[in-house]
Image (cartoon, rainbow, N blue to C red):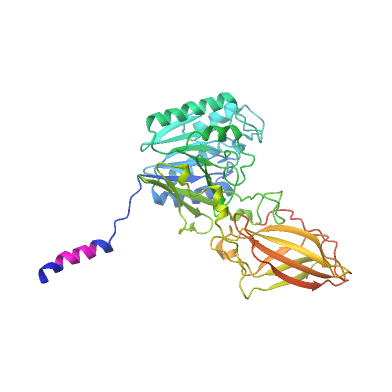
Amino acid sequence: MKQFFPFFAAVLLLAGCAVKETPLLKIAVISDSQAVAERNHWGMVNTDKALKFLSSFEPDALIIAGDLADRTDPKIYDIYMDVFRENFPDTPPVQVACAGNHEFWSRPPISNEIIWNDFADGLKISRDNPSRQTVGGYDFITFTEENSKKYHTEYSDKMIGKLKKVLDQAVARDNKKPIFLVTHYPPKNTVARSMRGRVKLRNLLNNYPQVISLSGHTHYPIDSEKAIWQGEFTALTTSTLSYGCIGGKYRNVTNGSILPYAREVQQAMMMNIFSDRVEIRRYHIGDNNREIKPDKVWKVAIPYDPAKALYTDDRAKHTLPPQFPENAQMSLRHDFGFAYLLFTPARHDDLVFSYFMRALVKNDDGQWETVKEAEYISDFYRYQRHQTTEFSIKIPEKTLVPGKLMRFEVYAEETFGKRSKPLAIEFQTPNHWNFTKQTKQLYPQE
């Protein structure tokens, strides 16, 4: 038996030392820095932080999905290129960038063509729009809107025709590999906050299953699984290095979309390409480069088959609702004319996305009547050290009824809208409380 020992020892040694698979290509992804021509501006500081971290992966390409600059001065691109070279001094990645709406906000107004040329020349990229380049055997296409000074416009048929031609060139070169398409605005009804995305872009991409669309503009936190979508093709939204936004009618957001503590959303991605898949890892740059959900790495199969897609709209059918802990508590607090509900946060195997509040009053006939309903975004996107063990929501104005017995119910919701059982409290509202204060959020907390 002794003569077999070296053989078995070698087998055991190999089994315990599995070789880590090396990506064929590594792609860093950022967007929406909205920096100005100052090295210490918020957007440029965050861009510097992101590139410093992403450089540790030695990426082959760097994708910028628009709004790198809140352009008032073309010198912004000189400052950015200094930051880029400092973080990639030896082997810089290929830059794959489109412009967004903020690049075109120039004072005094000048032509789109001049702004585009300044952008392309400043980043040392092609002036072609759309532009196609092949990196490591994979095609990357950038596509900038021709009328980016205006919101909610559509691509012209001429521009869509140009994009189709370039997509067809990429397919003809290699019809099995993914094609990475970078735009600022998302294709309509794909990723979160794309309801006002581009219809013609969506209609075109429906014919190209190998496309992986990367878009900016939404500032949507990539903690949420709605940041990836699959249907006829694959779409990703790229978050932001400036401030986070959210969709929906949430009571605690500003201007209809800006998150509370919005500056805490500074995020980026790394895409690793293997022969049979693309893996997308998410990072929270502002939170000490923390990886977001390392146990839920997004994976896109190569070749992509829509019938086997993982991130379709059908995901909503398979999620479970959040739950409050058995010992969860809730209280009501009156403070300087405002009223708050404070409660133990709910739990979920992914994340608690929001809270729904219902306020009821007991009428003289003993029946409960709903007087107010409101939704609040949770703190899932914030720095981990700021995620609280006691969540607080501000009760809307004209909710409390003096001298009446009231019931407050709070429901937790997950990403796709499944709702928990309620946490509830009943409360006799004092007559002497101040009910005049308004509770609408006036500005994003920093």
Res. 337 visible in picture = no
**The C terminus sits in image quarter:** bottom right
Residue situated furthest bottom in the rendering: 327
Q: Is residue 157 above or below residue 423?
A: above
Residue situated furthest left in the rendering: 3
Compared across the picture, whether 341 is left or right of 432 comes to left
Report the magenta stretch's main SS.
Answer: helix
Compared across the picture, whether 175 is left or right of 230 comes to left
Q: Residue at x 11, y 71 (%)?
A: 2
Residue situated furthest top in the rendering: 158
Q: Residue at x 50, y 31 (%)?
A: 121
Residue 426 percent across, percent down from the top left: 77, 72
Residue 7 percent across, percent down from the top left: 16, 64
- Viewer-proximal residue among 132 and 308: 308
Q: Quadrant of residue 112?
A: top right
Res. 66 visible in picture = yes
**The N terminus sits in image quarter:** bottom left
Compared across the picture, whether 365 is left or right of 149 comes to right
Specify start and end residues of the magenta stretch as a single range. Answer: 6-13
Q: Is residue 260 above or below residue 58?
A: below
Q: Quadrant of residue 422?
A: bottom right
Q: Is residue 42 magenta?
A: no
Q: Residue at x 37, y 33 (%)?
A: 174
- Viewer-proximal residue among 315 and 147: 315
Residue 214 percent across, percent down from the top left: 51, 41
Q: Is residue 330 above or below residue 214?
A: below
Q: Residue at x 40, y 50 (%)?
A: 57
Q: How many marks?
A: 0
Q: Is residue 11 magenta?
A: yes
Residue 90 percent across, percent down from the top left: 36, 44
